[in-house]
Image: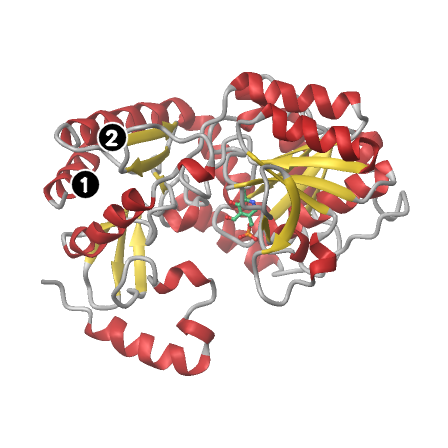
Amino acid sequence: MADYRKSKELYERAVKVIPGGVSSPVRAFKAVGGDPVFMDYGAGPIIVDVDDNTYVDLCGAWGPLILGQCPPEILLSLARSSTSGITFGTGSSAEVELAERIVEKVKPVEKVRFVSSGTEAVMSAIRVARGYTGRDKIIKFDGCYHGHADYLLVNAGSGLATFGTPSSAGVPEDFARNTLVAELDDENAVQQLFDEHGYDIAAVIIEPIPANNGLLIQRPEYLTFLRNITKKYESLLIFDEVITGFRVGWGGAAEMYEIEPDLMTFGKVIGGGMPVGAFGGRHEIMDILAPNGPVYQAGTLSGNPVTMAAGLATLDVIERENSYSHLEKLGAFFERRLIEEFADYDADVVRVGSIVWLSFQEERPRRASQIRKSGIDKYNSIHRAVLNEGVYLPPSGYEVMFISTEHTEELLDDAAQVIGAEL
Ligand SMILES: Cc1ncc(COP(=O)(O)O)c(C=O)c1O
C-alpha cells in the first residue's frame, strides 16, 4: 500500500486556507473518495507525488500536456522567454507568431485573440456573438462544459429543451434566462428552440466532441444540422475546442467533421501547460472587438510572452514529430488493450485520438442523460486501487484520460493491466 503521508499533511494544511483544499473542485477527489495526492515533479508520462510515489499520468493535467511533463523544448522556450522579460503588457513577437500559426492551421479562424483561460475564451466568444448579432439568447447543451461563467453554469430545466436553471449557487436566475439548454444528439430539441426563439438566438455553443461528461461522440449529421440551422436563423455556431483544439489534429474537431463554425475557442494545448485561452473566427466577426469595434474585452496578462513561447514550442514539436499520427497509434493500442481487459465486463472504451474515456456500461451514450450512474460508480470504486498501483486516473468517472506523445506502448500496456486487475 502506497504511503501518502506528506500528501495528507499538505491536504490538512490546504483545507485550512483554501476552500476544500484545492484551487479547482474535482482535484479534491470527492467523487472517488480518499484524500487527494499532491504532485511534486514529473517527466514525460510519469508524475511523482510528494511521498515519492510514481504514477503513469493518464490525466495529463486535464489536457494541456500533449507532449508530457517537462518537454525539453518547452523548458528551453520558458527559460529563454522568461529571462528576456516575464510580461510587458505590450504586444510581443511570440504572440504574433502564435496567432499566425493558429490562423494558418485552423481554417475557420482568420483572426484570434488570446486570453488566460478557457473560461475567458468562451465568455469572450459569446460576448462577440451577442455583439455581432445584436441578440441575447444562446443555446448550450446538457453535458457540455464551457467553463464557469455565470450564464454557462446552467442546466436544463424541466422539459426536453427549455430555459436553463442555474447549476451553481451564486448565479442569479436572471443570468440563466438567456441560456437555453437542449439535450445533445436531438435535432428536434434544437429545432423547437429555434421555432420559439429563432431570431433572438445569438449563438449555439457546443463542444463538437463533448469531453467533459464522459466522451459523448456526436453524429456528423447532427453537427451539420447545427451548422445549417444556425445559418438559417443568422445566429452563430461556436465550437468550444478548449480540449480538442490542437489535440485531435491541427484543425481540431472542425476539420475532423469538415464543418466551419463561426467562432472557435481554444485553451490547454496552445499554452504548453501555461495559463491560456484564445478565441477566433472570421475577420468581420472578430473585428467587432475593441479597439476596432464596440465589444469590449481585455486582459492584463493576455498574450503573455512566456505563455506564447510555450505554445509555439508545443506546436513546433508537434509539427516536427508528426505527433498526431503517433498519438493516434498510441491511442489505438491503449484502446485495444483496455478492450481485452474489459472482455468479461459491461464496459466500453470511447476514444478520439489521444482522448480516452472508460465507460462502464454496454451502450455507448451520446447524451449526458444516457450515462448510467452505476457505470460512474464502478469507475470511482476502482480509482484508489488503481492509484495505489501507480496509475493516475482522472479523479472522476465523468472525466476523460489524455495520452501524451511520451507514453509508450509498454506503459499503456501496464496501465491497462492494472485497470483490468481492479475490475
Ligand atoms: C470544453 C471546455 N471549455 C472551457 C473550459 C474552461 O477552461 P478553463 O478551465 O481553462 O477555464 C474547459 C475546461 O476544462 C473545457 O473543457
| Residue farthest to the front, as pictured | 159
Relative horizontal placement of residue 126, taking residue 366 as reference (left or right): right
Relative horizontal placement of residue 212, taking residue 81 as reference (left or right): left
Q: How many marks?
A: 2
Whichever of labels 2 and 1 marks the residue nearer the N terminus, that label is 2
Query: Considering only vertical position in the picture, is 105 above or below 158?
Result: above
Q: Position of residue 342 (x, y in %)?
A: 17, 32
Secondary structure at badge 2 equals helix
Q: Position of residue 302 (x, y in %)?
A: 68, 54
Q: Given contact means CB atoms under 8 Å apart, are the residues at marks 2 and 1 in contact?
A: yes
User: Residue 16 got which mark?
Assistant: none
Label 2, label 1: how far apart the Cα atoms are: 9 Å
Which residue was labeled with disc 2? 334
User: Residue 415 got which mark?
Assistant: 1
- Which quadrant does the N terminus fall into? bottom left
Q: Nearer the viewer, residue 178 or 241?
A: 178
Query: Considering only vertical position in the picture, is 333 above or below 180?
Result: above
Q: Position of residue 353 (x, y in %)?
A: 39, 27
Query: Considering only vertical position in the picture, is 293 above or below 195?
Result: below
Q: Is mark 1 within 8 Å of ligand 1?
A: no
Relative horizontal placement of residue 210, taking residue 21 as reference (left or right): right
Secondary structure at badge 1 equals helix
- Which quadrant does the C terminus fall into? top left
The answer to whether residue 107 shows anywhere in this view is no
Q: Nearer the viewer, residue 382 or 324?
A: 382
| Amino acid of disc 2 | Phe
Relative horizontal placement of residue 177, taking residue 11 as reference (left or right): right
Q: Position of residue 51 (x, y in %)?
A: 20, 68
| Amino acid of disc 1 | Ala
Q: Quadrant of residue 193?
A: top right
Q: Residue at x 78, y 35 (%)?
A: 197
Q: Residue at x 31, y 23 (%)?
A: 329
